[in-house]
Image (spheres, coloured by chain):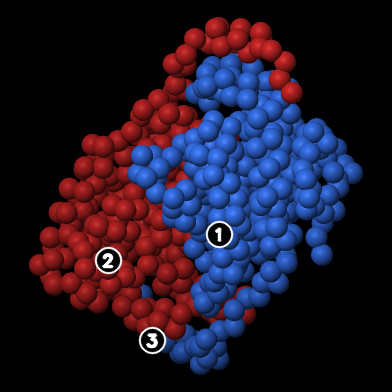
Chain colours: A red, B blue
Amino acid sequence: MTSAIADALRLPSGPVDLTAIDPDSAPGFDGKKADGKAALAGMQPELADLQERLWAERTAGSERRVLLVLQGMDTSGKGGVLRHTIGLVDPQGVRITSFKAPTEEERAHDFLWRIEKGLPEAGYIGVFDRSHYEDVLIARVHGLADPDEIERRYGAINEFEARLVDEGFSVLKCMLHISADEQKARLAERLANPEKHWKFNPGDLDERAHWPAYREAYEIALERTGTDIAPWHVVPADKKWFRNLAVGQILLDTLRGLDLQWPTADFDVTAETERLAAEAPVR
Amino acid sequence: MTSAIADALRLPSGPVDLTAIDPDSAPGFDGKKADGKAALAGMQPELADLQERLWAERTAGSERRVLLVLQGMDTSGKGGVLRHTIGLVDPQGVRITSFKAPTEEERAHDFLWRIEKGLPEAGYIGVFDRSHYEDVLIARVHGLADPDEIERRYGAINEFEARLVDEGFSVLKCMLHISADEQKARLAERLANPEKHWKFNPGDLDERAHWPAYREAYEIALERTGTDIAPWHVVPADKKWFRNLAVGQILLDTLRGLDLQWPTADFDVTAETERLAAEAPVR
C-alpha cells in the first residue's frame, strides 16, 4: 500500500512527456503550504522509528538498505531535500554521496566505478545527490561520450540497479521537476543576495540555453530506466514545500513496505538481567 | 569568547581526577531540563548558518573544517549526541565516522591509519564516534598493545592533532562522563525492552568489572593529550539533555570562533544579472 502522493508521482511505463507534468502542481495532496510542512514534520517520528529498525536489522545480519537517487536541473532543490527531508532522519543512519564532474581518475574507469564506491552499506539510507544518470544526461547533451556508449549505458544502468535490488537494496529514484521560469527566478535570487553568490556559477546561465536538450535527455532516460523494481518518480518542484513532502512520503512508503522488525535477542535475556542485578558494586 | 558551559567543562592542564567531576551535574547552566532542551533547539538557526558558511568557504578554497571527537563508556550517549545535537545541522555538511573493533587489515597498520581515512574534508563538520583514543583506552585496559607502544601513542596522538590544526582543522574532544550507576540503569532498560535488545551485548556486563581501570585509562589519556590547541571537555552525561546541550554549545563556540564569512563573488555580479534578465526565452 502506497500513499496518494507516491501513486500520483510514480511514472508509468511508456514514452515520457515532461511538458505534460506541471512543475507547480501538488499531485495527491489536498492541502496548502502550511499543511504540507506540517505533514512532513509529522512524518518524523515514523521515519525515525523505521530508520532505526533498518539499522537494527543490520546488526542481525540483514543486507537491506535504501538508495534514494535525486536528480534535477540546477536549483531544482536537491540540497533542500537533503536539508529538510533527509535532515529528519538520524544522521548516523544516512550516507549522502554527491557526484560532481568526474575527476580524471574517475573518467579513466567505467561510469559506474565511482557509483559503486558511493553505495550505502547494509542498514543505511543512502542518498545520491546527482548520480549515474548524469552519464546519460549532461553526457548526452554535451556529447561527452559517443552515441554508442550513451546507448549502452541505459542497459548497463538497468542491469546495475537490478543487481542492487537482488542484493537487498530498495532503489527509489526522484527527478525534481522544475520549470525554466522558476529556475530563472531562483538564479536571480542568488545574484541579488551576496550571501548566495557562492552558489552561483556563470556556467549555470549557459546551461539554460540547453534546456530543451536536457528535457529530451531526461525524457529518454526516464523512459529507458523506469522499471518495476526501480521506478522513477517525477516530483513537481516549483513548490519547495511539496517537493520536500513528496520525497519524504516516497521514502516513508518504501520503509513501510519493508515490514521492518526489531531483531530478537541472541542472548538469554533473563540470565543477563539477573547477572546485572547481582553484580558486585561498581564504582 | 566562549560560553559559560564550555568554560566550565574545558579540562585544565595537570592531573585529572574524574571522581571529582559529578556525572549528574550541569556546570555552567542554570536551567532545568525543559530550559536545556529549549536552549539546544534555539541554537539550531545559528548552527545551520555557521555550518553553511563553513561549507561556502570551502568553495572559495578554504581548508578549514571541524573534527568533533566523542568518547565515553557504553551507554554514555554518543549516539544520542549524534541524533539530537549533530542532527540539528544540515546532513550534507556532516561526516560521521564510527570506529568499531579494528579489522584485521586495520590492525596490520599503525593505529592512526584508519583514523586518517575517516578525517573530514574541508568544509565539513566531522564527528568521530569513538576514535584513536580507543587505542589508549581499551588497548590499555585489555593489554591489546605492549606498554611501550601505548606509551608511544600519547605523543603520536599529540603530534597527529597538532598537524591537523596546522592543516585547518578545529579539533574538539568531548568525553561523555557517565556514572557506573547510570550505566547500570541504562543497561537494565535495554534488557527490559525488547525493542532495545539489539543494542545489548553480554560483553557490556563483563566490561563493567573493568570500570576502575577504564577510569584510570581515561584520566591518563585526558592528562597526556589535553592541549591548548586540541582541548578536552569532560561532559557530565547522566543528564541526557545536558549532555546534548553541552556538546552543542561547545560546537557552536568553536564555529563562532572561526569568524566565518560568506565568500565574495568571483564573477561580475552586475553583468550576470543583466545577462539573465536579457536571455532569450527558455521553455
Residue in front for this viewpoint, B88 or B121: B121
The amino acid beneath tag 2 is Glu
**Residue B7 shows which numbered tag?**
none
Look at the image and tell me whether residue A37 can be seen.
no
State the CA–CA distance, disc 3 to disc 2: 36 Å
Q: What residue is disc 2 on?
A: A106
SS for dot 2: helix
The kind of residue on which mark 1 rests is Phe
**Furthest residue to the right?**
B30
Determine the residue positioned at 52% across, 77% down.
Answer: B61
Dots 3, 2 in contact, CB < 8 A: no
Left or right: residue A225 compared with residue A246: left
Residue highlighted by disc 1: B160
> Which amino acid type is marked by label 3?
Ala
Secondary structure at badge 1 equals helix
For discs 3 and 2, the disc positioned in front in the rendered view: 2
The residue that disc 3 covers is B280
Where's residue A155, x and y in %?
Answer: 15, 54
Residue B24 location, quadrant: top right
Q: Quadrant of the C terminus of chain B?
A: bottom left
Chain under label 2?
A: A
